[in-house]
Image: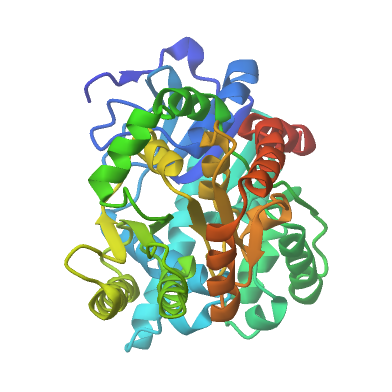
């Protein structure tokens, strides 16, 4: 397995903190760690007290192993069962319901398949619990990440009552009224309630979860608190200082074909929670009501593929393409393309170049736990310029008060927000951006990790 090395016997006792996620943060061949927000968030914790990552890895080693200095433990289950757990129950049932978009919840035509999804979710959670119970040292802190593993707290309390279990939910928690009607709700909420600490992104999510526990598991008594996640600003600042030169910005805009007109930018996974179609419709209304002789703006939309085997995501991409084509047909000319879609994943340096090139950053999800793109944009604007148009339904809106905050479901608010952002004076823009940057640079992902660990210990 390339650079992977089996742990030595003297390191057999796991360190104090176990970070548990649905899959291990390693490349396909398990030769290197993958970069990502969670890895960056927990690096200082690993340095200070040591940690072990636990997650699924197809054909992973039976024993703990080390990659790039990080200790890892693989959970074993078949790819078929993992798919029913991850692509089935987690992402076609829990994901839409937790985001308040129950219309996207998948109901398999055969009831037995729905049962298979839920049973797979139970079995994979059980596999995680048994693996953790095997390897965790006495009294270890088990930090469970997100909605994929909601059954772990009760399972671990049964298997290893000496462990301290804390859960962080990266996605929203739904209004209990939308949850209590689900046949699986009582089971999931009551078993989640066995944790000692449950962290959420927003105070609203904490209130929803507290109410759900009261209704569905009144005997549970976890501490429920909001811990809004953030970003690692250091690498962003380093890249932004490199990419902020006028020549680089000009080169990026030339490549996109927006050298002589205003630019709005969206960077999203192709997910129905992100409000991409609503954004396109609002942009169309902006073009239709454009006044004066100034050039029409261009919307550049980065579309990152995700969950491509799930029908709802396939259908959503098709709708995005249809909406884009219609706007370009209606308003485009031989020399002007209103919407430029870019399909694919961008590296951090490439994203920062886009952030620095745009006039307006559109972060307008219908519902989101946090949406770190908003914070990444702010951190990258070392020029104190640019406007952030931010959804009131993104967790970031609770912190980034100097953004232009809009209702993502209101076409009127979205369109007016775009217009106001494009016409904002330089003075107002800089005042707002300096305020945003002060908050983001002063509340990093390292603060988030440290605060959560302290509360959970």
Q: Quadrant of residue 307?
A: bottom left
Q: Who is closer to the viewer here, 376 or 337?
A: 337
Q: Position of residue 64 (x, y in %)?
A: 41, 26
- Give the quadrant of the N terminus: top left
Q: Position of residue 265 (x, y in %)?
A: 42, 55
Q: Residue at x 57, y 51 (%)?
A: 387
Q: Residue furthest left?
A: 334
Q: Who is closer to the viewer here, 333 or 195?
A: 333
Q: Position of residue 305 (x, y in %)?
A: 30, 57
User: Would residue 119 be seen by someone viewing this image from the given angle?
Assistant: no
Q: Position of residue 171 (x, y in %)?
A: 58, 58
Looking at the image, residue 92 sits to the left or right of residue 452; the answer is left
Q: Quadrant of residue 24?
A: top left
Q: Residue furthest front?
A: 293
Q: Residue at x 50, y 53 (%)?
A: 361
Q: Is residue 305 above or below residue 211?
A: above
Q: Residue at x 72, y 41 (%)?
A: 435
Q: Who is closer to the viewer here, 118 or 453?
A: 453
């Amino acid at each position: 397995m390339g650079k992977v090395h089996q742990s030595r016997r003297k390191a057999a006792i796991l360190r104090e903190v176990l970070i548990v996620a649905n899959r291990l943060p390693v490349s396909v061949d398990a030769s290197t760690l993958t970069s990502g927000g969670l890895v960056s968030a927990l690096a200082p914790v690993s340095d200070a007290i040591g940690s072990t990552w636990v997650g699924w890895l197809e054909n992973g080693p039976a024993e703990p192993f080390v990659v790039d200095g990080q200790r890892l433990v693989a959970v074993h289950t078949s790819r078929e069962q993992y798919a029913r757990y991850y692509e089935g129950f987690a992402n076609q049932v829990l994901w839409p319901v937790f985001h308040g978009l129950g219309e996207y919840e998948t109901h398999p035509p055969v009831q037995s398949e729905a049962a298979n999804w839920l049973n797979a979710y139970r079995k994979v959670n059980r596999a995680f619990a048994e693996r953790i119970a095997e390897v965790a040292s006495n009294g270890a802190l088990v930090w469970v990440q997100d909605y994929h593993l909601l059954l772990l707290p009760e399972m671990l309390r049964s298997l290893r009552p000496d462990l301290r279990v804390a859960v962080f939910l990266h996605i929203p928690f739904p209004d209990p009224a939308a949850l209590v009607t689900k046949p699986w709700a009582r089971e999931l909420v009551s078993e989640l309630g066995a944790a000692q600490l449950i962290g959420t992104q927003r105070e609203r999510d904490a209130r929803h979860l507290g109410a759900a526990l009261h209704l569905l598991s009144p005997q549970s008594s976890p501490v429920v608190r909001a811990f809004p996640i953030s970003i690692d600003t250091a690498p962003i600042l380093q890249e932004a200082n490199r990419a902020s030169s006028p020549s680089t910005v000009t080169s990026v805009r030339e490549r996109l074909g927006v050298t002589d007109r205003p630019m709005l930018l969206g960077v999203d996974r192709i997910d129905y929670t992100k409000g991409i179609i609503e954004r396109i419709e609002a942009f169309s209304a902006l073009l239709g009501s454009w006044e004066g002789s100034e050039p029409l703006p261009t919307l550049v939309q980065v579309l990152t593929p995700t969950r491509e085997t799930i029908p709802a995501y396939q259908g959503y991409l098709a709708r995005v393409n249809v909406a884009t084509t219609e706007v370009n047909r209606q308003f485009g000319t031989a020399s002007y393309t209103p919407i430029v879609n870019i399909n694919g994943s961008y590296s951090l340096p490439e994203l920062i170049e886009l952030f620095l090139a745009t006039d307006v950053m559109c972060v307008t999800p219908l519902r989101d736990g946090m949406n770190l793109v908003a914070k990444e944009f702010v951190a990258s604007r070392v020029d104190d310029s640019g406007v952030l148009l931010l959804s009131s339904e993104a967790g970031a809106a609770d912190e980034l008060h100097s953004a232009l905050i809009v209702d993502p479901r209101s076409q009127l608010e979205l369109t007016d927000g775009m217009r106001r952002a494009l016409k904002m004076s330089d003075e107002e823009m800089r005042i707002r951006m300096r305020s945003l940057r002060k908050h983001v640079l002063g509340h990093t992902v390292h603060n988030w990790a440290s605060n959560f660990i302290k509360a959970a210990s």
